[in-house]
Amino acid sequence: MRKMIVPLALAILAAPALAGNLVGIADCNEDCGSTVVYVEGAPTRDGAGTTVDFDQKDKVFIPHVLPVLQGATVNIKNGDPFLHNVHVYSGKETVLNIALPFQGQVIQHTFTEPGTYEVLCDAHPEMSAYIVVLDNPHFATPNDNGAYEITGLPAGNYTVVVRNVKSDKIERSSVVVN
Ligand SMILES: [Cu+2]
């Protein structure tokens, strides 16, 4: 993985410590759409009160990989004019299983425990997605070429993790922000 640290222009504004944006190319050519990039060792935060959208549209979960901050609430929407359900697993254990029969219907679920959750729709076996709950807000999903940007990292030493949630292939590298 190539990466470089780009100091935030905002840091000029009398910030006591330089913050950093982490810009990189994840080595995920085989399946960047199932890849999430996140930082270990950053100050933890609680996402209570924040919301993230997660859609079911044309029998596809959008996005396929949804990283969220612990404590955040996910708005799960049925964007199709027919029934879906949302069946969320932690390993083999069901943590949520709710039907959404109507187009435009939204249900909310708050994810308080960090981890990787697989999401299926029992009505459409081809539908699958992953919600990755993280303990700090410094994460991203790469584009099709692997490019990603993680913003607002305070100065410090961190581990950057590039992980394919489907295969569980993990690549770790160290990074210094100053
Ligand atoms: Cu469905």
Image (cartoon, grey):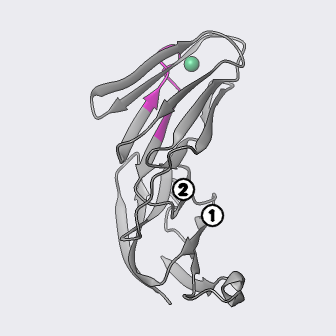
Q: Position of residue 153 (x, y in %)?
A: 52, 75
Residue drawn where x is 39% and y is 38% of the image: 117
In magenta segment, residue 76: no
* Residue at 56%, 41% in the rendered image: 64
Q: Residue 39 falls in which quadrant of the image?
A: bottom left
- In this figure, which residue is indicated by the disc labeled 2? 32
Q: Residue 91, labelled with which disc?
A: none
- Extent of the magenta region: 119-130
Q: What secondary structure is found at the residue carrying circle 2?
A: helix
Q: In which quarter of the image is residue 71?
A: top left
**Quadrant where ligand 1 appears:** top right
Amino acid on which the number 2 mark rests in the picture: Cys
Q: Going by the image, does 54 lie left or right of 80?
A: left
The residue beneath circle 1 is 145
Front residue of this view, candidates 146 and 71 = 71
Locate residue 9: give its quadrant.
bottom right
Name of the residue lying farthest toward the left: 92
Who's the residue at 62% across and 86% down the image?
A: 15
User: With 15 as the anchor, is 89 left or right in this view?
Assistant: left
Q: Is the CB atom of the residue marked by disc 2 within 8 angstroms of ligand 1's nearest atom? A: no
Q: Are marks 2 and 1 in contact (CB under 8 Å)?
A: yes
Q: Is residue 122 magenta?
A: yes
Is the residue marked by circle 1 packed among few (<14), some (14-19), or many (20+) residues within 10 Å?
Answer: some
Sequence-wise, the earlier of marks 2 and 1 is 2
In the displayed structure, would residue 103 be above or below residue 175?
above
Indicate the secondary structure of the residue bearing disc 1. Answer: loop
- Residue 155 lies, in percent from the top left, at 48, 84
Give x and y (percent) for residue 59. Answer: 63, 24
Q: Is residue 77 above or below residue 8?
A: above
The foreground one among 33 and 105 is 105
Say which amino acid is labelled 1: Asn
- Label 2 to label 1: alpha-carbon separation: 7 Å
